[in-house]
Image (cartoon, helix red, strand yellow):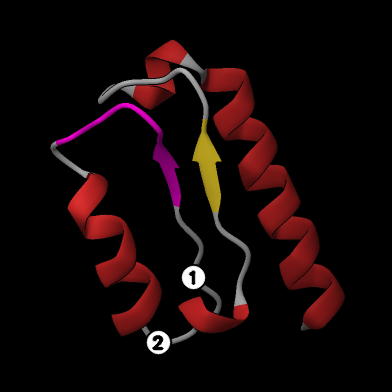
Amino acid sequence: KPFATAFSDADPATEPWEAVFRTRVPGASRSPHWRIERAGHFVQEEKGEALAGALVAFLAHVEATG
């Protein structure tokens, strides 16, 4: 199953989990991952367009790789 992450670059609360998700979740090693620049804990509110772009890119990756 494909699994991607999109973490912000300025959130100390979630930063330690980035590697955990990328290494332990099935499918994550074969999927792209993003770091949203200049965003804090509420990345969806602070950088919604960048997060949406990551989602669109992930969906394109899933479509292309099956």
In the rendered image, which residue does mark 1 sit on?
Answer: 3
Residue 65: numbered disc: none
Find the distance from the CA under tag 1 to the CA under tag 2.
Answer: 7 Å
Q: Is residue 12 left or right of residue 32?
A: left
Q: Is residue 23 above or below residue 6?
A: below
Asked whether the beta carbons under mark 1 and mark 2 sit within 8 Å of each other, the answer is yes
**Of all residues shown, which one is farthest toward the left?**
13
User: Residue at coordinates 62% horizontally, 26% vertically from top-left?
Assistant: 50
Q: Residues within 10 Å of mark 2 (few under 14, many from 20)?
A: few
**Residue 10, magenta (yes or no):** yes
Horizontal side, residue 1 vs residue 62: left or right? left
Q: For the point 25% across and 70% down, which residue is it?
A: 20
Residue to which mark 2 is pinned: 26
Work out whether residue 27 can be spotted: yes
Percent across and percent down for residue 44 are 41, 24
Where in the figure is residue 63, as x and y percent of width and height? 80, 70
Q: Position of residue 52 (x, y in %)?
A: 62, 32
Q: Is residue 1 left or right of residue 64?
A: left
Residue at the image point whose x is 52% and y is 81% from the top: 29
Q: Which residues are magenta?
A: 6-12
